[in-house]
Image (cartoon, rainbow, N blue to C red):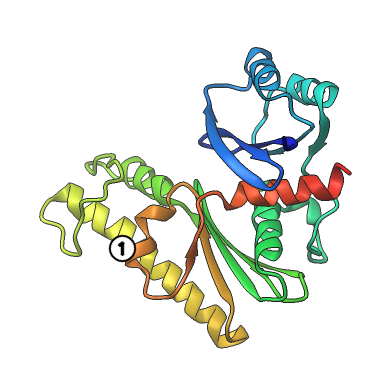
Amino acid sequence: MGQTTLCFDFGNTRLKCGIFNNRELQEVLILENDSDETIKHLIEKYTPAKSILSSVIDHNAGLEQLLASASRFHKLNHASKLPITTPVGKPSDIGADRLALMSAAVDLFPEHNNLIIGLGSAITYNFVNKYKEFLGGGISPGMEMRFKSLKMFTAKLPLVEKDWNMSLIGYDTRTNILSGVILGMAKEIDGMIDAYKERYGNFNVVLTGGDAPYFVYHLKNRIFADPDLIFKGLYAISEHNNK
């Protein structure tokens, strides 16, 4: 029987937990909340040997103590031991989610240049060279943020929900917005990939995040799509820090 690791990813939209048995991701849970009761239930059900938390929100501080009392716990931050080096400047400003994504890429694709694109509340572009150096990247508004901004900053445009059923030429307000946001983002992503290619030549492009499936078939560039990349990164970081 293997060793269980709980990998928590607390983002701006969802609270999630990846359950690993050794290196194998068994399942991903979406948590209703981060209360003590919720965390205690997970501990009792999975009896983890290790746990790790990546959080970009103000989470329940008590859960850290709960996890530390039941497992070898690590909270991901800029001081964590990582399989990458971070840029000079302010490493403390790098989001924990971005650190996890980059760690996963170098763990899965060692000795390669990697561009990791995270599609969540924001789009993050993260470039790691073959020497495992994080060189930086970019951040732009994500899909739901774009939908909400059209509603918020105009007098008559509606709030549109994301939808698979869309075409290049919209036939009403809703489909015009879907086309402009989703296909516009696809062209932005392709353009960014092309700009990196001009500077760095060949590299892996890894697409991940909750909104990634909306863009896989709209991109002209070859990519690897992995919706669970952040959990694989958290597991790798846990192994570095929870010996």
Instruction: Residue type at mark 1: give it.
Output: Leu
x then y, percent, for residue 154? 29, 45
x then y, percent, for residue 74? 81, 37
Taking depth in this image into account, of 140 and 227 the one nearest to the observer is 227
Task: Work out whether 181 lies above or below 42.
Answer: below
**In the displayed structure image, the side of residue 87 where residue 136 appears, left or right:** left
Q: Would you identify the image quadrant in which residue 47 lies?
A: top right
**In the displayed structure image, the side of residue 223 where residue 215 appears, left or right:** left
Kindly identify the residue that appears in the image at 42 percent across and 50 percent down.
Answer: 211
Could you tell me which quadrant the N terminus lies in? top right
Kindly identify the residue that appears in the image at 37 percent across and 60 percent down.
Answer: 215
x then y, percent, for residue 119? 49, 53
The kind of secondary structure element at disc 1 is helix
Taking depth in this image into account, of 207 and 111 the one nearest to the observer is 111
Residue 9 visible, this angle: no
Identity of the residue furthest to the front in this view: 1
Taking depth in this image into account, of 208 and 242 the one nearest to the observer is 242
**In the displayed structure image, the side of residue 198 where residue 58 appears, left or right:** right
Kindly identify the residue that appears in the image at 71 percent across and 43 percent down.
Answer: 22
Query: Label 1: which residue?
Result: 183
Kindly identify the residue that appears in the image at 80 percent across and 56 percent down.
Answer: 91
Identity of the residue furthest to the top in this view: 37
How many numbered badges does the structure rendering display? 1
Could you tell me which quadrant the C terminus lies in? top right
Identity of the residue furthest to the right in this view: 243
x then y, percent, for residue 220? 37, 75
Q: Residues within 10 Å of mark 1 (few under 14, many from 20)?
A: some
Identity of the residue furthest to the left in this view: 171
Task: Work out whether 76 lies above or below 124.
Answer: above
Residue 58 visible, this angle: yes
